[in-house]
Image (cartoon, grey):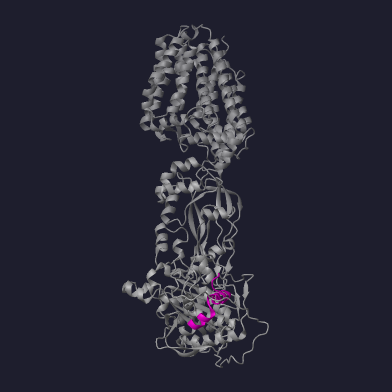
Amino acid sequence: MRAERVTFRDFDWWLLAIALSICAIGILEIYSATQNTSLAGMHWRQMGWVALGLIGMFILARVDYHAVLDHAPLLYLSSLAALVAVLLFGEARYGARSWIFIAGLSLQVSELVKLVIIIVLARFFSEVRTDQLMLADLVKATVLTAVPLGLILLQPDFGTAVMILPALAIGAFLAGLQWKHAVAAILIVLLLLPVGWSMLKPYQKERIYTFFQPEENPQSTGYQTLQSKIAVGSGGFWGKGIGQGSQNQLGFVPVRWSDFIFAAVAEELGFSGVFITLLLLLALLLRLVQHAQRAADRAGMFVVMGVAAVLGIHVLWNVAMVIGYVPVTGIPLPLMSYGGSATLFVFLALGLVMSVRLRRFVN
Amino acid sequence: MSYWFGNEHRLPQARLTFLTYLLVGLFVVLVLGYWKLQVLEADYYAELAERNRIRTVPINAPRGKILDREGRVLVDNYPSFSILLLRDDLREVERTLPQIAAGLNIPEEEIRARLEAARHEPQFRPVVLKHEATPADIAFIEAHRRDLTALELLMVYRRRYPRDGFLAHVIGYVGEASEQQIERSGGRLRPGDIVGKAGLERQYNDILMGTDGLRRLVVNSLGREVGRLDEKEAIPGQPIEITIDYDLQLVAEAGLAGRKGAVVALDPRTGEVLAMVSHPAPDPNLFAIRIPPEEWRRLNEDSDRPMLNRAIQAQLAPGSVFKIMMGAAMLESGVLPERFSVFCPGFGVFYGRTFRCWEKQGHGQVDLHRAIVRSCDVFFYNVGQRLGIDRIAFYAQQLGLGRRTGIDLPGEEAGLVPSAEWKQRALRQPWYAGETISVAIGQGATTATPLQLAYSIGGIASGGVFRQPHLLKNYSPVEEIRFPLAERTVQKLAQGMFGVVNEDGTAQRSRIAGVEFCGKTGTSQLISFDTLRRLGGHLARRFTENAWFVGYAPRINPEVVVAVLVEHGEHGSSAAAPIARDVVKAYYDKKSAREGQRYTVELRHHDPEQATMIAELQPRLAPETVSSAASRTPAVSRRQSAEPGSAHRSTDSGTR
């Protein structure tokens, strides 16, 4: 391993600033959404998670990502073990057995597994020596992803599982995915849809039903979407002000401190707030792509783009879900939704990105 | 570690750039999506958000109390719960309707009908599903707060009426406004509003009914109230004080004691109604809100007709009470001399037909005074024959019969004073002189309500001043119809009625020591005895006689006049007079207690010869028309036409 000659002079302070700005908006809305509920004070805990994440990020930034990739097999096996452990001993929350207690903190293992999958896929794709991705490699990568994904589906945590797929897709795409394989993969997915449908839980089916016919059952997920849309729409251009959103404050918006936090932002800060927040999120993601483009090697690029893919799909899906463009799945908005594991994951992922960034100049 | 550095492949910049554009493109789509919602459709969603958080709940305004003349509470309110169906979210209502119907035990169609009826109402106004929620209903609603959000409980004030039908016909009752009432109210009434449906509740609904307020609540997603926006206060209805004297009413109700009939007590000096009973009466508490259809049918189909306020709606032959009007007509018209007398052998023959007196042995030689005291039919047959129907009709009408008294209660009937002109108009038949003979003793087509008889007798004893009976204490203006009677006429008739009670009259057992209690009995036959015999014993009670008594005190310018009707009461003297006596006695007992003095009977005889005419009271004369040609055919009256076999009613015993 090369000598560590990195300095924090090269640290991407802009990226950090953007990330913390997004966190600030999130914490503000967590405060606003929970101030009059039994969850009041949750924003302090979120700040704690952000602080913890920052420490993790700085530590990880110092570590050479190549070293991390070296341990990919170990990480991979450990996470499989952890997922199995969660299935056996985990604690169920919101109907999914995905939580485990470590040192007094409850952790959502699948959040950290996302990170491992990014690392494993980066390692795998960086070892591909051809310009074009061979079918055998594609299948191998798919299998590598499918095993933990399957375990997460068993929890069952459909949302998180689906959010991992873009890491595979983007990775394969950058590794030289051939169009014919892409078309074939899409066809296979389409053919497997009926099988997958039959494996869905009733509530998942309902979510998909109501997505296509939201008016039919206003009391369930369609109702959630409707209330979310009302919150967004009624916010208008300038918003109702912090703590002033009736949809938010009176609890019409479901889990408004977590998955639907963007609805709270939209209601209380208006379109102007939405626009600024989306700009920040886009800036974050574009900055990641930029780092990928400037990475010292393919391994670095795959690490960064893996992070970008997972964060990107979270952001896009969540923001689209709030206005009813995609079905409701329980996925958080990175850096904004309340949640320790999710916040930790994002900062650790950003730590990996920093690690790549700090080593962009090949010497 | 060689694999790290052996990798000299260039990065896939093109594909990275492609991903950049893809990312930016997707963000643009999302920004446009938010733009659409927050800028283009902001107003629509703002309205939805408002509707979400604001719930409008009506505040029930209590109806005004009803107090008796001394301020005692007759009708007041008690709090109860109504079940409301909120229509803010009709889809939600539609979805949960079967569950609501099952849980509250209301047919689904009924709920739909109610929603339909309120279709044109503002959507924020809820529909009343059920008044008087049971504990089970309340438990059901509380248990389903979260999933049946369209249900709401509303505290409302309900009417508490006296029990067992006490004063029921006077007070009336309330119920949901009918469609016609809503239409006629000009926007004041809305579907589901509780309004007076009968009696004073209906007559003075505008005073009694308050104006409901509105409260706009901020509710959270569970429908729980978290704050109040504003409130339009409910304006309670005004109380009304009525002229009924609770004590007299009690006596009157007790007097009738379950028999069918009516009692009306008036103060002729003012027109105030002191007591009014009609029996049988429904208990208004039973259907104060919404009466079950079968109960309503039962009440309306009951042959005893409990829904009828007999005091103002029973139109019955006045019988011998009518002899007072006859006496007035005789004296005022001057057709017969005051000393006119006839010999009563127990019957009289007119137009070839025999008309009997109730006293088979006959009364011997009787003048007007004796004829009133003993209620001689033959005397009045003769008077009637000589006066003729048109003169009788004129005086009867002037003295308050055949027209509504104008009491402030809905549904008063006018009764009927038959005349040649009336018969021609109504039955398209000429008047037969024989009918006049029946009319002369208050039979035939003649009908009057108990109120009319009290009004008329009270007016006659007051010298011909008829004051509009009313129940509202500060009723104004009280209509006053004057048909001035000669003082002598008044004295003569009053003396006769004094004799009915205080001489050897038909009501001599109803004297009150110390009170100048006067009156006139009456017994009106419903059908002839012949018919009765044919129908058989089991129907006898249904078709016997109505007992009347109209009593008053003191003798001239009375303070209280009481008309009593006891249906199938056989005789006015035995059935009706004691009730009137009790009411008058109660009146004087109260007065004595109040003023600390006893009233004594003036036992001096009024000599008509010594009485002086009051100069300014010039009696009006009846039209000098001659009754139509005599006929052997007896009259066919309105009621008789329904009973073809009973056409000869007046042939049997008369009335007393």
The mark total stands at 0
Query: Which of the 4 image quadrants contains residue B354?
Result: bottom left
Residue drawn at (35%, 31%) of the image = A88
> Residue lying farthest bottom?
B604
Q: Is residue B171 left or right of residue B104?
A: right
Can see residue A199?
yes
Q: Position of residue B536 (x, y in %)?
A: 31, 73
Which of these two is toward me, A261 or B296?
A: B296
Residue B150: x and y in percent read: 48, 46
Quadrant for residue B606, please give it: bottom right
Residue B393 among those drawn in magenta: yes
Q: Is residue B544 left or right of residue B312?
A: left
Dominant secondary structure, magenta: helix
Left or right? Give the position of A141 relative to B403. left
Image quarter hosting the C terminus of chain B: bottom left
Residues A253 and A229: in front is A229
Residue B276 horizontal/vertical position (percent): 51, 73
Q: Residue at x 43, y 53 (%)?
A: B137
User: Residue B338: x and y, percent?
Assistant: 56, 87
Q: Is residue B574 above or below residue A240?
A: below
Range covered by the magenta-colored residues: B381-403
In this rendered view, identify the residue nearer to me: A344 or B286. Answer: B286
The answer to whether residue A21 is visible is no
In the image, is residue B36 above or below residue B474? above
